Structures are given as structure tokens and as C-alpha cells.
Image: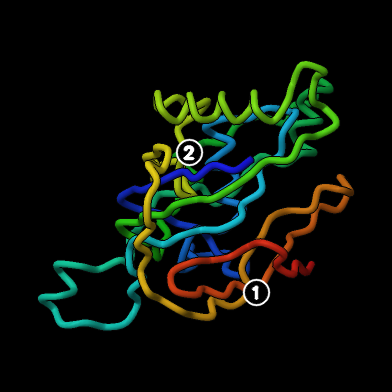
Amino acid sequence: MSVKVEVWGDYACFSRTELKTERVTYDMITPSAARGLLESIYWHPGLNWVIDRIYILQPIRTERRSAEKEAADIRLTSIKRNEVKSKISASGAKSAMNGGKAPLYLNASNERNQRSSLILRDVHYILEAHFDMTERAEPGDNPGKFQDIMRRRLKKGQCYQQPCFGCREFPAHFREWEGGEIKTVPLTRDLGYMLYGMDYSDPGMIRPKFFRAQLVDGILDLKDCEVVM
């Protein structure tokens, strides 16, 4: 059983994993970000979301344009954001739990650092997805039940936490797609290798998974795509 969810927002940043110091977004939402967005709306241990297709309803523009057109209709922009330059280590947290003297906090004033971010503006997508039942499903769980719950939550605008486009400060609005023809941006482009998700099969060695993203007529088809690690 599948659902189509329309999502849109003012800003988005789907950070490229190969660029660490300054955030640079992918040209569009990644499958992992799309799954996280759906899980923010409805998550259950008995189901696993799988993204089938992503439809782009707003153009992706990265080329230089005239000043007039750029001011009126640009989709990519650079901003500066406050971030912290370090994080609490797992060993430090474990030491604090065992009675160690290491402080379990970060002083944001001392750790704050301004960094540039290249982000997307005015994003608008339709996420087509289905879910698979997992071994953690209860005897009373079934696909029809989960689909009804998801559609009810979409209709009421309910979510477990505010869905976002990559970063918490970039909230995502959502609703169930009303149906009819999806008018995508007629854009065909090779987006290169894009993050597909993370492989958690070995907790001691969590590895990223990538795939070759091919955008055809504004549609990123993820069915049977080849995933590499």
C-alpha cells in the first residue's frame, strides 16, 4: 500500500556528506531525508517506510541569471548560520554515567562558530512511498490499519515532531496529495551519487549507502535503484 505526501517549505539543506566544514546541499531532497520526514509524521516499530519516487514541483536553479530574474525567482542561496564546533563524545558521556569528573555539557558561547551554508529555497515535492511490515509488528497490526492511521494524521496535520528539510530550523509543511495529474518541472539531469541511507546491520560499523541519482522529467525514480557502499 502506498501514499503520496505533498511537502513544501521556504528553505532546505540536505548536506553533502563529502563536504564537512561548510554545509552544501544536494540539489534536491535525499531518500533518507524523505524517510525521516515521513517518520516524523507517523512512525511505528511494525513498519518501515520505503521511498518509491520523488516528484519535483519547483525548479532547481544554480546557474547565474540576470539581477531582475535572480531577485524574483532564485532557488539556491548562501547564508551564515551559528553552529557549535564540537560535540559531546560517547566516551565522555559514558565516563559521566560512571561517576567521572568530565562535564557532560557544552558551553555554547565558547563553542559557537559561524559557518556558511549553501541551501535551497522554495522547495516543493511530492513523496510517493510504501511501507513494509517488520518483525516487530503486533498480531493485530496489518497494512490497512497503518495506511488508515497515516492518512488520518495527514488529514489532521498531526505529527510526532515537526518535519523538517534537513535542519530543524527549516520546517516542512505537509498534506496528503489530493490526486490528479502531478505537474512536475520538466527537468532531466544526472545528479551524481547521492546519499540513500545508512546501513545499521553492524552497530559497530555504521556505513553510508549511495546511489546514482538520475532525474528524468522532474521525477527521481528509486524503485530497484542500485545501492553501493
The mark tally for this picture is 2
Picture disc at residue 108: 2
Marked residue nearer the N-terminal end (1 or 2) = 2
Of residues 111 and 229, the one nearer the viewer is 229
If the image is split into quadrants, where does the C terminus sit? bottom right
Residue on which the image places disc 1: 212
Question: Which residue is outermost to the front?
Answer: 180
Residue 69 image offset from top left, x and y in percent: 15, 75
Question: Which residue is outermost to the left?
Answer: 68
Residue type indicated by callout 1:
Arg
Secondary element at image label 2: helix
Residue 170 image offset from top left, x and y in percent: 39, 45
Picture disc at residue 107: none
71 shown above or below 172: below
Quadrant assignment, res 212: bottom right
Residue 32 image offset from top left, x and y in percent: 62, 52
- Kindly identify the residue that appears in the image at 42 percent across and 38 percent down: 176
Residue 97 image offset from top left, x and y in percent: 79, 23
Frontmost of labels 1 and 2 is 1
Q: Is residue 119 left or right of residue 20?
A: left
How far apart in space, not on screen, are marks 1 and 2 (Cα)?
A: 38 Å
Secondary element at image label 1: strand
Residue type indicated by callout 2:
Ala
